[in-house]
Structure formats: structure tokens, C-alpha cells
Amino acid sequence: SFSARQTARIKTRIPLLRMKVVTGSGSVKAAIERMRGVIEDQANVKKVEVITPEEGGKMKDIVLIPNRSILGPVFREKSGLVERAISALNGKEAMQAFERGETVGVEVEGIGRIEVRKDYVGVQERLPENYISERCKYGEIFIDTTKSEELLAEGLARDIVRRIQEMRKRADLNVDDYIRAFVRTPSEDTRRALESRAAEISGEVRAKELRISLQEPDFGVPEAWEIEGEKYAICIERI
């Protein structure tokens, strides 16, 4: 999933909605079922599913890519019209016809009906826009890249927790010391996102008081942090 995340430019801290593992191996499926919780935790994904290659295939569209090296010499100045007509065909239906040894008829403006042969096209498999796929030695992995406000808030909260924990460490606080904390956010959207996770943040960093505001802190010396290109200020104080 980490390679697929890099392709989608989604950092590990941001939770994923779901990950589908495509495999026809019973042993791989059993291992994933057994280790599901660990995988979900390590990959930071809400749900891991195991699907068969057939189910994976149904998720993909087939796009026909006109083969210009063949179409050009055959149709010459009309080849552009033929390419457009081929690109509009239903890829799955066309491939099924080719597998039966058949051609696919299509009407082309200025030419009439032509029969599209298998060598007229290349094939590209395409997942829905919100999915990214990566192959591995155990099969194929699909990750759902849908970004909801809830998932983004969870990722931002983790970033804030990590920075407060770093500040606790530098302040030489004991593990069981309680603090009060103040987080100045760069926008109302980020303030609301963090407020929705305030209880979680407080529990992680042992904050008996946590204020999240657009205003400057009213105690201590704020420390500046940059998260996803936006500037935050955080103060902590032992109580």
C-alpha cells in the first residue's frame, strides 16, 4: 500500500477508507484474514478486503487504444475518424468479441461501416478515478483514495499529537505528567477539524486542558510548526 500511496501522493499519516487485495491464493487470503487488524493499523486504512481476480477485473474498465501504426496505412487520411470511432467503443464488449475470434462493427463518418480487428487496438485497464493499483508478488492492491473531511481531520490530529509529544520530550516531562495545551490554527476549517478530534488529542498527549483557536496563545512561548504548507503555533505547560 505504501507504493500506491506514493503514486497517489497521500502521506502515511492520512487514513485510507479501504484497501482491496486481489488474489487467487487461498493461503494469501487466510494470512490477510488472520492479520487483518495489524495490516489495517500498519497501512493506516479503515478496512481491508480480499477479492478474487474475477472481482478485481469487474472493477476495471477496458479502454481501447487505436493502433496508429496499422490504422494509418489502411485508412490513410481517414484514420483520425476511425480512431475516434474505435475510442468510443465499449472496451469490455469489444474484448469479449475478439476473444471469440470475431470483429466489431462500427460506423465511421465519411467511410461507413468498418470491421474492427483485434490488431487495430491496444488495451488499457482503468480503475475508477478514486482507486490506485499496485502489483506485488502476492497479487494486486487497490487503494481507495477518497478523502473525506473525517479522514483529513484524523490525519491532521495525528500530526498535532506527534508535535506535542515531541515538545513534551524536549521539555523533559515525565510520561504521567499532565499538561495544558494551546493550538493556534491557520484557518477556521482546520480549527473545526481539530475540534472534532479534541478528545482524542487530549487523551494522547495527557492534556487536561486543550484550547484550539485562531487567536494567539495566552500563556507560554508558542512554537511554530508547518503542516502541509500551513503554519500552526503550539504551547504546552505542565500542570
Image (cartoon, rainbow, N blue to C red):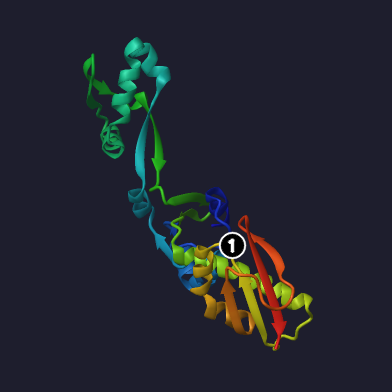
Q: Nearer the viewer, residue 37 or 8?
A: 8
Q: Is residue 134 above or below residue 123?
A: below
Disc 1 residue type? Pro
Q: Position of residue 21 (x, y in %)?
A: 45, 58
Q: Position of residue 110 (x, y in %)?
A: 23, 14
* Other residues around mark 1 within 10 Å, as few (<14) / some (14–19) / many (≥20): some
Q: Is residue 199 above or below residue 10?
A: below
Q: Is residue 182 left or right of residue 48?
A: right
Quarter-wise, where is residue 165 in the image? bottom right
User: Which residue occupies 24% across, 29% down?
Assistant: 102
Residue denoted by label 1: 186
User: Which residue occupies 35% across, 10% down?
Assistant: 77
Q: Is residue 160 above or below residue 66?
A: below
Quarter-wise, where is residue 25 in the image? bottom left
User: Which residue occupies 38% across, 14% down?
Assistant: 72
Secondary structure under tag 1 reads: loop
Q: Is residue 74 left or right of residue 35?
A: left
User: Which residue occupies 36% across, 18% down?
Assistant: 71
Label count reads 1
Q: Quadrant of the N terminus?
A: bottom right
